[in-house]
Amino acid sequence: MLKRTFLVTLTALTLVFFGVSSVSAQTTQEALSLGPSARPHGSTDHQPFADTDLYEYDAQLWAPYDVTTVDGTTSMQTGFYSEFTYAYTFLSGPSPVTGEDPRGFPTVGSYSWARGIELGFMGRKDSGWNLDWFEYENNTYLNDGVYRGTSPGFGSRFPTYVRTNYNNFSFNRQFRQILSSGAVVEPFVGVRYSSLVDQSVQDSAVPFRFTQRVGNSAIGGQVGSRYFRQYGRFLAGSEVSLGALYNDQSYSAGTQAGIGAPAIEFVNRNNDFVPVFDIGVRVSYNLTRDVAVRLGGNFSYYWSGIARIDSRRAATNPYFANNLLPLPAEVMTEGVTTAGVSLGIDWRR
């Protein structure tokens, strides 16, 4: 009896063993093993539905980064990013003196294409750094050229040719906070440097050339915040910041009695406190997982304390050597406005 029971048991175990092996061979399923699993990364076997490993991010080249968890929040990208911008920008020019500019404009400005670059990093602990640079350069005229040579002799209304170069550089510590609505707020604090240089040339009917050069080097701190909200492939955002800068100003004017003649030069210096305010809006569209195109608008206002050239023509300008007028005690200062629309491309990884 015992021998029969042993034989039946042995036969049953043999059938089970060969049967399982046969099924495994026919279905190509993995056999049980004690080593690491041979299943590829991202397999859904025995994993929760909301596990981020379900998403093969590196394989989704043409998909935006949008991993939404069960609670409805969206994971924002971390790591390095860069933004390249071309902006069609207006920059206000030196304010004309009443009666000096025949156009009667309250201010004179110019439009030109500007360039901007932003490089940054956002870590997994919702903090990081960013570096931003913006450059504008253009030429304009004071005293409309229509009036060129209308009054012969000294003091004719020859236009003043002005070349302006503006640079802005900032380095910020930034942080990230995801709101319950799914939007993201990124406050930042940092250091800002702004430079604005005016250079002008004015000729007159007699062989005199009057030149001016004004330089501003303003440095200080700023605080601000950005706001973002994802809508599928679209990302809408805005930015606002306030800064306080210390500005070192320099002014020089030269008068030449003919081409190649030695110049008589006057020099003046000053310094001032400059408050600055910035606001911007943007809309980005993700072309691929890492690359987006962007349309935006920006406005900056330097409240006061920016030195500009003296817009009076040579006949009435106290810095013109032949006038023998008292030199101004201080450099002329005013507020400066920049505003424009921008096109850009973003890379985030």
Image (cartoon, grey):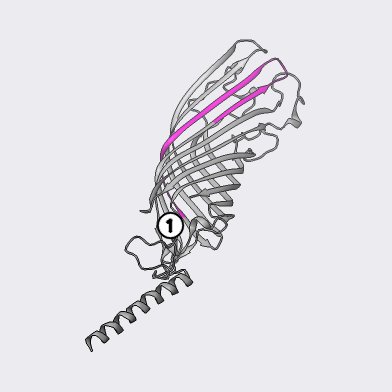
Q: Nearer the viewer, residue 334 or 280?
A: 280
Q: Nearer the viewer, residue 267 or 77?
A: 77
Q: Classify mark 1: helix, strand or loop.
A: strand
Q: Position of residue 244 (x, y in %)?
A: 42, 41
**Residue in view at x 44 percent, y 73 percent:** 22
**Residue in view at x 55 percent, y 35 percent:** 166
Location of the N terminus (image quadrant) = bottom left
Magenta residues, start to end:
197-226
Mark count: 1
Q: Nearer the viewer, residue 63 or 215?
A: 63
Q: Position of residue 61 (x, y in %)?
A: 55, 55
Q: Position of residue 298 (x, y in %)?
A: 56, 48
- Which residue is disc 1 drawn over? 185
Left or right, 240 with respect to 97, comes to left
**Residue in view at x 57 percent, y 54 percent:** 288
**Residue in view at x 62 percent, y 28 percent:** 312
Outermost residue, top direction? 261
| Residue 11 found in image quarter | bottom left
Q: Nearer the viewer, residue 240 or 71?
A: 71
| Residue 70 found in image quarter | bottom left
Outermost residue, bottom direction? 1
Vertical side of 249 occupied by 325: above or below: above
Callout 1 amino acid: Val
Vertical side of 224 occupied by 148: above or below: above
